[in-house]
Amino acid sequence: MTVGSLLGSLRRQPVIAVAAIVAAVLLILAVAYPLLTHVDPNGSQLRLRLQPPSWLGGEGLLGTDQLGRDLWTRILFGLRTSFLVSIGACVVGAVVGTAVGLAAGYFGGKLDAVLMRITDIQLSFPALLLAMLVVGLLGKGIWLLVLILGLSTWMIFARVIRSAVLQIRSTELVVSSTSIGATRTRIVLRHVLPNVLGPLAALVALEFARIMLAEASLSFLGFGVEPPGISLGAILAGGRDYLQSQWWIATFAGLFLALAVLSTNLVGSWLQRVVDPTRVTT
Amino acid sequence: MTDAAHAVRTRAVADTTAPPENPALARVENLRITFDRDAGDSVSPVEDVSFEVRPGERLAVVGESGSGKSLTSLALMGLVDRVGGRIADHSQVEVLGVDMVRAPEPARRALRGGGIGMIFQDPLTSLDPVRSVGFQLGEAIELHRPALDKHETGKLAVDLLDQVRLPRPQALLASYPHELSGGMRQRVMIAIALAGDPDLLIADEPTTALDVTVQAQILDLVHDLCDERSLAVVLVTHDLGVVAGFADRVVTMYAGRIVEQGATEEVYAAPRHPYTDALMRSIPPLTHREPRLVAIPGSPPEPAHRPTGCAFHDRCGFAEEHVCTTERPPLTLVEGSSDARRVACLRLTEITFPLGAARATERAESTGPAGAADGSPLVSVRGLTKKFAIRSGGFGKREQLTAVDDVSLDIGRAEILGIVGESGSGKSTLARCLLRLIDPTSGRIEFDGRDLASMSARELRKQRPRMQMIFQDPSSSLNPRMTVRQTLLEPLKIHGRPADEQTLVGLLDSVKLPASALARYPHEFSGGQRQRIAIARAIALRPELLVCDEPVSALDVSVRSSLLNVLSDLRAEQGISLVFIAHDLAMVRFLCDRVGVMFRSRLVELNGNPEIYDAPVHPHTRALLAAQPIPDPDVERRRRTMRRDLLNEAGDPSTEGTRNVESA
């Protein structure tokens, strides 16, 4: 899969191409925020509170919030939190879930039964409620949030990876590797794992967007990132009271959140389709 | 048929000699089927195909993968648009007076299951698993015979099951597809196809998923039904042996075009197209042991990558530069032959095939390759048994399936041992037990004097380089994410063997693949080439024993013989012992020194190569030999009656597929 053929595939799918550009722009905004704003995101100027965007005769690119903080700067920092938490939680969930799924699927038997029951038990808990409980007990913090959200998603990875492994086990790949003298570790890491990367990529794409929303929800409810940390969910919560008159606060925060979730989801599912080497490249 | 339609047709195919009053049942003219691809371009898997089906005749459409034979049969059923294909404007497909391209869908639908009966490859997926046989048969009858009342429908259903020779038809109506064996399911499919009292039966690879003995019975049944009901059949298949015993006329397709057509006897006696000729000669004979098979180089092209000019020129021994490579051969009438014998070859008049002569001389020389060397056997198996625990239905009730039952055999050094048997006979389980890829329940497997069955995992891994295996489906045994280089390097790395470029190129050379293959991925190769890669990996460690589990069954007919030659060379050049597992007795005849026959988990007969063919002892061996299709119409016709008695004796259809299940 070369860069050229990836670009060629994008050219044939304009919707995905737009989504890829949007996702890239959002990521650049989240990473390169110092170049785009020089304002302290928490610096409140009560004199300039609830100002509309400058192009509507107000203050700042996207206006200010109820404490007079620059909304554009806060959204940039919120995006940064969104990406950071989602990437971190996905890594945690994918690593834990893949390990569990590989072990359960490849070795089967009692280990499989025990691991899958644990998975079932955790799946039966509402993830957000559990997250709120843990936050209530252990306190807030962005890295704790990464861990909690990561551990709220590993079960899905475990299940999908397990079924993918079972499918590979049923082919002759495992037997033929055994017959050349490969050890079990080698078979799992060199033959099984690379062949479940396709479903893994698809799932990361879906879960990435879901976690982004979950983080925003938790922050909206006051269980997520707390000040001075900034989250799009918290901005939305703050803007909720001003929807009628100062619409821009909730609208722009919500718009950026929606764009981030939608574009990463589209790009993720497209990537999953094109990186599969068994697919004949046209 | 209207005058206008007729006029269009005669204009479209000026060279078609069929007179207008010829009452053809079905007529395909200038059929071209095109698919649009994601990339924006399009491919045409079927190009310019014309033929007709006459009332009551058995017509076979033969071809390999990518030949367009199945799409052609879909066109006859008016189903091409359902699979996303387009039929060109100048194409005509007419069945029983209905235009299957342009007629409205209801008219076409009425014909399917009515005037046209259809049978497909896998009866398990074509039958509804949650409906009883009686329901599905009744449904077919109600759709196409609305005049019948409930009582008459029931009677007809029983009558149809009786016609397809199913025992106890009344009781069978209440059973479900999963309760029936493969052969019985296919009989039910045929009964459903007959429900609309068709004039034309289209059978797309109807016996490919079945065992040879069942295949023979099903084909004989369809053959008889044709005579009884004056039914015309279009049999779509890849198997030239099946055609010989079945068809009156044969249409051979290659790369989307018809390359040869004519009466079966004439085509088989003297094929005139280089492809047909090479294909016939590449099939190993059952009557004697060839020293070497005629191999066709390369593999059939995919629709998107067909060569210019004659599509066969790159594999043809007679191809001439600037003629065959540039000009597309028209399908022309062969002079002096009867019954619309046509061949699409530019050099038709220039070349002659020494088919008959070649066969006679080879037979005279044929003594077979040197037999096994003397001395102690490499592998000695005693009392090998493998049982699987299967859970069935109820709480904690366990049953055991005996897959291999008390098998004892020896494999000599540099010997090729064939194991034949039908599906479920335990031959694949035996193969895996031999290499201890699965643990046997009891018995000894002595490999060079040491018992594999009781060896520790670590010890076993040390022995692995000495014994290797090749599987049926190379696309599932090779890692799709590893290049050929990585694939070949892996065994060498695991066992710490030196692995330089020269070694890898040498491995590829011994399976006749170019060095340029190293950097590519398995999916970039054809099925036959992939199997060569699998063989190259297996011999990388210089094993003493190579177990091949149906290594060519998944491959196209034209690439099989060259692979069999490769296997034969391995023994001759490297002294490797081979266990060759197959269901095709003709391939075993060519390759093996001794043959074992598995039947219901037991090794029922084991004998030397000429002996077991000349004087088979066990009834199942005799049944297998009688059912093996032979690509010779004369022989097949003579065998049909003899076969019927033998197969009836060997297996009642009501018991076929019975497994050795015992309570534990």
Image (tube, coloured by chain):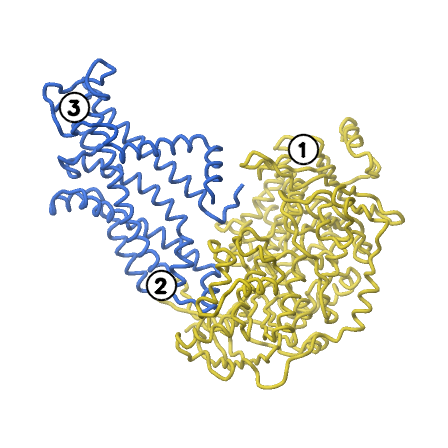
Chain colours: A blue, B yellow
The quarter in which the C terminus of chain B is drawn is bottom left
Instruction: In this rendered view, identify the residue nearer to me: B277 or B512.
Output: B512
Chain that bears disc 1: B
Label 2, label 3: how far apart the Cα atoms are: 56 Å
Return the mark for residue B66. Answer: none
Q: Residue furthest right?
A: B336
Q: Is residue B184 visible?
A: no
Chain that bears disc 3: A
Asked which quadrant contains residue B505, the reply is bottom right
What amino acid is found at the position of numbered circle 2 in the picture? Phe
Question: Looking at the picture, how far across and down is residue B276, in whole percent?
Answer: 75, 54
| Numbered label tally | 3
Q: What residue is drawn where x is 88% and y is 47%?
A: B335
Q: Name the side, left or right, on which B397 lies relative to A247.
A: right
What amino acid is found at the position of numbered circle 1 in the picture? Ala
Label 1, label 2: how far apart the Cα atoms are: 54 Å
Q: Which residue is mark 3?
A: A65
Question: Looking at the picture, how far across and down is residue A147, in whole percent?
Answer: 21, 48
Chain that bears disc 2: A
Q: Is residue A58 above or below residue A210?
A: above
Disc 1 secondary structure class: loop
Question: Looking at the picture, how far across and down is residue B563, in whole percent?
Answer: 64, 63
Q: Which residue is mark 1?
A: B88
Q: What residue is drawn where x is 31% and y is 50%?
A: A94
Asked which quadrant contains residue A143, the reply is top left
Instruction: In this rendered view, identify the residue nearer to me: B575 or B594.
Output: B575
Dot 1 crowding, Cα within 10 Å, few <14, some 14–19, many 20+: some
Return the mark for residue A107. Answer: 2
